[in-house]
Amino acid sequence: MKNNFLSFVKKEFLHILRDVRTMLIVLIIPVVLMVLFGFAISTEINNLNVAVVMPVKTSALCQSVERLDHNPYFTMIGEISESDVDQVLRSGKADVVVVFHKDYDRLLLERAQGVDTPPVMQFVFDASNTNTAQSGVMYLQNVLTSDLTPQGMLNLHMLYNPQMKSAYNFVPGIMGFIFILICAMMTSVSIVREKEVGTMEVLLVSPARPFKIILAKMIPYFVISCINLFTILMIAHFLLDVPMSGGWWGIIVVSAIYLILALSLGLLISALASSQVIALLISAMLLLLPMMMLSGMVFPLENLPSVLSPLPNFVPARWYIEAVRKLMIMGLPLSSVWQEVLIMTLMIVVLMTISLKRFKDRLE
């Protein structure tokens, strides 16, 4: 019986290796996605064009402007008059104009003494690009916050990602996306293809139990996904400078559990679909789109309406991305993600039970 199981595994490996196009997709696409999203596509603000309005050129105000000028994230356009603010923004010469109060020095001094004063400056943004505007506000506040509290009344600390590198956010999300793509979609298509050509029915009536047949088909994709996991971690750490603060083993353990979960999803899809086209449609509609929208990879889950807030709890990638961020970026130990691991494990049990029952029913 053991030899039969190993023969099934060997057959599936040979079947995958003979399909050169599939191998290229499985091994190269993850590398391309990691480099593209982690290195080429960046949400960081660089060269934000800044103009300033300086009613009175005092020493404190000039120091603030000089701080902006020497910051690598900003490109200083120069000083303009208050009447030119709208024209400069409309022409695209500047992304933001910082307008300083005419009593800048006096207001800073009064604020340091605890007096409630009006704002000492205002940011006028071109918000036609909301991403630039939102990030730019945060960057400017970080740079100029010492001016608002000259006596050190406020110390601003950005934990875990002080440079606000977008790779720190994208890498865990792309890992969740890639493993779903490879494990779930490829596994479901592979099994459904067997059903279409009639070989799955032959396998199911063989002496081997259905569980072992399905397991034999899943093992090759698990091994390939482990290779991808190693490649992704190397790229993330050595090319994108993403830290592995919580330790490599914790990330590997959580990722292995997520790989099994993704394979279970692929198995469920194959049990529901009758053709490869339907399997791809189910994968796209039920896995990829919800994962992009409801996993926290791109959009903050806190922004969801209260009616829809429970939906992300049923998206496996949400729990994996949260766990990897804690381990990779925040440097927490494996014990800190026990809740995410438990939820993913329960999902595996539920999905595997439903899928195997469906295959058993087909056999009967």
Image (spheres, rainbow, N blue to C red):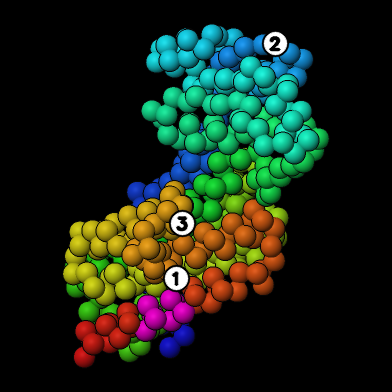
Q: Does residue 223 appear in this view?
A: no
Residue type, numbered disc 3: Glu
Q: Quadrant of the N terminus?
A: bottom left
**Is 90 left, or right, of 85 in this rendering?**
left
- Where does residue 160 sit, x and y in percent of width and height? 67, 49
**Is 205 left, or right, of 262 in this rendering?**
left
Mark 1 closeness class: few <14, some 14–19, many ≥20 residues within 10 Å: many
* Sequence-wise first label, 2 or 3: 2
Q: Quadrant of the C terminus?
A: bottom left
Q: Which residue is mark 2?
A: 57
Does 329 sit above or below residue 260?
above
Instruction: Kindly report the secondary structure that dominates the magenta region of the rendered protein.
Output: helix
Rounded to the nearest whole Å, what is the CA distance between mark 2 and mark 1?
A: 62 Å
Q: Which residue is mark 3?
A: 302
Residue 97: within the magenta?
A: no
Residue 350: within the magenta?
A: yes
Q: Which residues are magenta?
A: 346-353
**Of the two numbered discs 1 and 3 in the rendering, the one whose residue sits closer to the viewer:** 3
Rounded to the nearest whole Å, what is the CA distance between mark 2 and mark 3?
A: 43 Å
Does 18 sit above or below residue 162?
below
Residue type, numbered disc 1: Leu
* Mark seen at residue 261: 1
* Mark seen at residue 246: none
Residue type, numbered disc 2: Lys
Which element carries disc 2, helix, strand or loop? loop
**Of the two numbered discs 2 and 1 in the rendering, the one whose residue sits closer to the viewer:** 2
**Of the two numbered discs 2 and 3 in the rendering, the one whose residue sits closer to the viewer:** 2
* Sequence-wise first label, 1 or 3: 1
Q: Residue at x 74, y 42 (%)?
A: 154
Tell which of 57 and 4 is nearer to you.
57
Does 33 sit above or below residue 16?
above
Mark 2 closeness class: few <14, some 14–19, many ≥20 residues within 10 Å: few
